[in-house]
Amino acid sequence: MSIDRSDIEKLGELARIHISDENALASAKSINEVLALVDQLQAVDTANIEPLANPLGARQRLRRDEVSEGNQRDAFQAVAPATEDGLYLVPKVIE
Amino acid sequence: MTWETVIGLEVHTQLATKTKIFSGASTEFGAAPNTQACAIDLAMPGTLPVLNAEAVRMAVMFGVAIDAEIGLISSFDRKNYFYPDLPKGYQTTQLDRPIVLAGTVDIQLGDGSTKTVRIHHAHLEEDAGKSLHEDFHGMSGIDLNRAGTPLIEIVSEPDMNSPEEAVAFAKKLHALVVSIGICDGEMAQGSMRFDVNVSVRKKGEELGTRTETKNLNSFRFMERAIVQEVERQIDLIEDGGKVKQETRLYDGDTHTARSMRSKEEANDYRYFPCPDLLPVEVDQAYVDAVRATLPELPEARRARFVDSFGLSAYDASVLCDEPSTAAYFETVASHCGDAKLAANWVTGELAARLNSEEQLIQHCPVSAEQLAALIARIIDKTISNKMAREVFTAMWGGEGEPDAIIEARGLKQVSDSGAIEGMVDTVIANSTKQVDNYRNADEAKRPKMLGYFVGQIMKASKGQANPQQVNEVLLKKLEALL
């Protein structure tokens, strides 16, 4: 698999970053190098191999449904850039 | 041109656990903003999720209730996207191995027939927080109390062919999850939210392109959104256009939907297995143990209402739409002893009043026992149906028990035959003209003429005469005059 300049533009849009024209070409080149590596890995036949979630085959432990976390809003909001009326403030979201 | 509508639903159901799916923070509704968002919910560095056992049990409970196969090993994946009410930058969900596999839900249609809707699967996931877009000096406010609330997303197959079927299915699911105790069913609080996938095709042709309308939190909105979307798609195609695969967002204030994003710019969620959570394993013994705790399901209850109470299939399914209504009805029926009358009152007068006052039956000011006591007075002929409605209004207004109200307002029905005969005699004596008309009328026309006399007698008795007795006595006396 390889990608071209228009893929880079799309990735930039999805990641919400501006990629300049000169950077688009350079980025395409270096990403293609990474993809070549991935192609190499994909050559391995894994058809009958279960994905490995844990080397020891461990299973998820469950927690009892009991409230253990109290209200620490003041502590958390002390490190937030902006808060008001108990809310975290962020740049306006327009969908 | 005959168009066929094809509808599939995704239903987000909040599970009624005490705590979040991956943290020990409370899920109680209505707390002050961010007082129930702990370090894990906020995605603070160094925190790790631990799965809530109760969320697993509730998901399995749903699975056994729809007769689904349970994913004995299920696993979590990360769905990556950026939005400020999702502090981690990904939603922890299940993509490849959900906990509930294929099952079925039966719905009753208006014509009395039953249709089976297939469930593709249901998976566990976490809810996001809430964004408040009111103006905070040009910024948005974020409340993360809801972040991490456990959900099951129930995904249906595209088995519904009309808005009515979609609503019937949604109501059935609602009744089901409430009656098995895994969801509080409070739609107004967002406990159940629907995404609808809609496409249209000409009969017999292949499936058309579908759109997804998100964020519907009431049955009424859902119905409207589907009706609108079907019309939009048909108009588009008939005008020579094509339906674009897109996500649409419904606005409950304006009752319109608008395109949110089209497929070309669709989010790439970059799903991958969540490295913080191991596969979840439940064994068959566990599934069987959960199955053993299943309460009576709405479907069984509906059948029982028909069989043992003699209700019509329609009344039974109306009552069983809402588990609280079914329970209320059962109390009324068993206390008053007349199930049909009880059903008439619960689906008639009571439902109408709850509806007009926008009140839930859980908060009904007239208890089931009180309504039963009122119906008992109709059965023993102390009051007429009409009087009962007056007493009911008084009970709704908080005037107390039916017997006390009947007494205080002097509503007791007159069933004393002597008194009724007296009233009938008086009215006949004062209505010579009408009596003459009656005598001279065609036999076939006479029954219609009784209305005048009955009206006069009821007026004379201030509405308290037993109407059945009045009819009998009146007829007898008029016959005697012929």
Image (cartoon, rainbow, N blue to C red):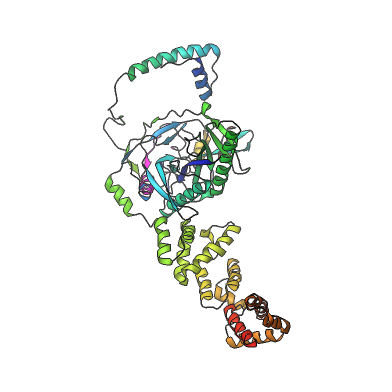
Outermost residue, right side: B433
Numbered range of the magenta stretch: B38-62
Quarter of the picture holding the C terminus of chain B: bottom right
Quarter of the picture holding the N terminus of chain B: top right
Q: Nearer the viewer, residue B135 or A3?
A: A3
Q: Is residue B356 above or below residue B54?
A: below
Residue B219 % position (x, y): 53, 48
Q: Nearer the viewer, residue B253 or B238?
A: B238
Determine whether, in the image, residue B282 is placed left or right of residue B408: left
Q: Nearer the viewer, residue A47 or A91?
A: A47
Look at the image and tell me whether residue B352 can be seen. yes
Determine whether, in the image, residue B329 is placed left or right of residue B417: left
Residue B91 shown in magenta: no
Q: Nearer the viewer, residue B418 or B132?
A: B418
Residue in the picture at 61% in, 82% down: B475
Determine whether, in the image, residue B388 is placed left or right of residue B56: right
Outermost residue, front side: B442
Look at the image and tell me whether residue B144 can be seen. no
Residue B126 % position (x, y): 44, 39
Q: Is residue A49 above or below residue B472?
A: above
Residue in the picture at 41% in, 53% down: B181
Residue in the picture at 45% in, 61% down: B327
Residue A28 % position (x, y): 47, 14
Q: Is residue B288 above or below residue B401?
A: above
Residue B60 shown in magenta: yes
Residue B88 % position (x, y): 46, 33
Q: Count every numbered label the image shows and give the total.
A: 0
The quarter holding residue B440 reads bottom right
